[in-house]
């Protein structure tokens, strides 16, 4: 499966401009070196304009779902749709949508861990649905959002459901870029999965975003990485036989003793 990751410089507080950027990027990518699957970053509709989300958030995906679904179908690609600020009945959520090549919505997830350092709990509601998987082209996968990366329990729960590819969509700051990188290596190695991330570049309210989106294989080797702090595209192909291979050679999942972990 061939991937293209959009390490996007999100235009703060301008959902229309960001939709236009994504449309143009996808059309360019599809013309150049057609990917099977594209990945977008976190909160691409509004950026981190948290104190202005009332006027900027989508309304239960009413703009985002048809927009991404049409792009998926028209260009015959799967879309891991990053995430958006999304108004629901009882508040604003940080929601990720995933579409297959037919434009069908196959998964949605509301970010469950909210970032205290960014005052997210003041502006957003945390999702309460259990970490779940979805399938694209017969492959089991998961998606988590930014700060979720710090909670190995979530990725483990997704991996235990059979996921072979774990996506991380993010706007992770440069100030903590080492955490961004090392935690991804750890998640790939411990879960023996591909880790594929889309981080943003650019800045918002004085915070610079790290870029350095990554593709890491199930042995913990770097397959591809984006430039630091600059808008760019990361292209990479993944080989899923590597997942079965490493799981056979180092059978971590068979060696687990859940009853001793208090599970
Ligand atoms: O955990 C971190 O250091 C960054 C998290 C973050 O920026 C986010 O979840 O949006």
Image (tube, helix red, strand yellow):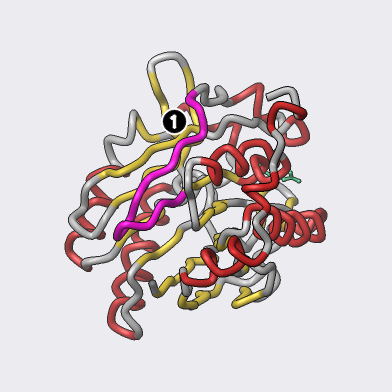
In the image, what residue occupies the spot 34% across and 50% down? 135
Task: Give the position of the N terminus as an image quadrant.
Answer: bottom left
Magenta segment boundaries in residue numbering: 129-141
At mark 1, the secondary structure is helix
Outermost residue toward the top in this view: 90
**In the visual, does 32 lie left or right of 237?**
left
Pick whichever, 13 or 252, lies toward us. 252
Q: Ligand 1 is found in which quarter of the picture?
A: top right
Report the residue marked by disc 1.
55
Pick whichever, 162 or 92, lies toward us. 162
Q: Position of residue 152 (x, y in %)?
A: 70, 41
In the image, what residue occupies the spot 62% across and 63% down? 201
* Mark 1 C-beta to ligand 1 under 8 Å: no
Q: Position of residue 176 (x, y in %)?
A: 81, 54
Q: Is residue 84 above or below residue 219?
A: above
Pick whichever, 12 or 71, lies toward us. 71
In the image, what residue occupies the spot 58% across and 40% down? 49
Q: Position of residue 238 (x, y in %)?
A: 48, 73
Task: Give the position of the C terminus as an image quadrant.
Answer: top right
Label 1 crowd (10 A; few <14 / some 14-19 / many >=20): few
Q: Is residue 212 inside the magenta stretch?
A: no
Q: Position of residue 191 (x, y in %)?
A: 63, 53
Q: Quadrant of residue 250?
A: bottom right
Quick check: can you spot residue 201?
yes
In the image, what residue occupies the spot 69% across and 47% down? 255
């Amino acid at each position: 499966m061939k991937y293209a990751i959009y390490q996007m410089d999100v235009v703060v507080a301008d959902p229309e401009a960001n939709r236009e950027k994504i449309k143009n990027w996808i059309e360019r990518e599809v013309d150049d070196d057609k990917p099977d699957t594209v990945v977008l970053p976190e909160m691409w509709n509004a950026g981190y304009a948290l104190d202005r989300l009332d006027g900027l958030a989508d309304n239960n995906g009413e703009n985002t779902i048809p927009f991404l679904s049409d792009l998926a179908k028209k260009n015959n690609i799967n879309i891991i749709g990053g995430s958006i600020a999304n108004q629901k009945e009882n508040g604003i959520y940080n929601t990720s949508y995933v579409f297959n090549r037919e434009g069908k919505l196959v998964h949605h997830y509301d970010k469950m861990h909210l970032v205290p350092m960014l005052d997210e709990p003041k502006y957003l509601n945390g999702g309460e649905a259990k970490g779940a998987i979805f399938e694209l082209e017969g492959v089991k996968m998961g998606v988590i959002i930014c700060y979720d990366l710090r909670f190995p329990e979530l990725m483990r729960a997704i991996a235990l459901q059979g996921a072979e590819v774990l996506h991380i969509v993010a706007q992770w700051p440069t100030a903590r870029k080492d955490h961004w990188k090392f935690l991804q290596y750890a998640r790939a190695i411990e879960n023996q999965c591909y880790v594929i991330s889309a981080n943003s570049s650019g800045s918002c309210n004085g915070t610079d975003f790290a870029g350095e989106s990554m593709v890491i294989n199930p042995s913990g080797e770097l397959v591809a990485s984006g430039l630091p702090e600059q808008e760019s595209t990361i292209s990479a192909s993944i080989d899923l036989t590597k997942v079965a291979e490493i799981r056979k050679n180092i059978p971590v999942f068979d060696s687990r003793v859940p009853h001793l972990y208090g599970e």
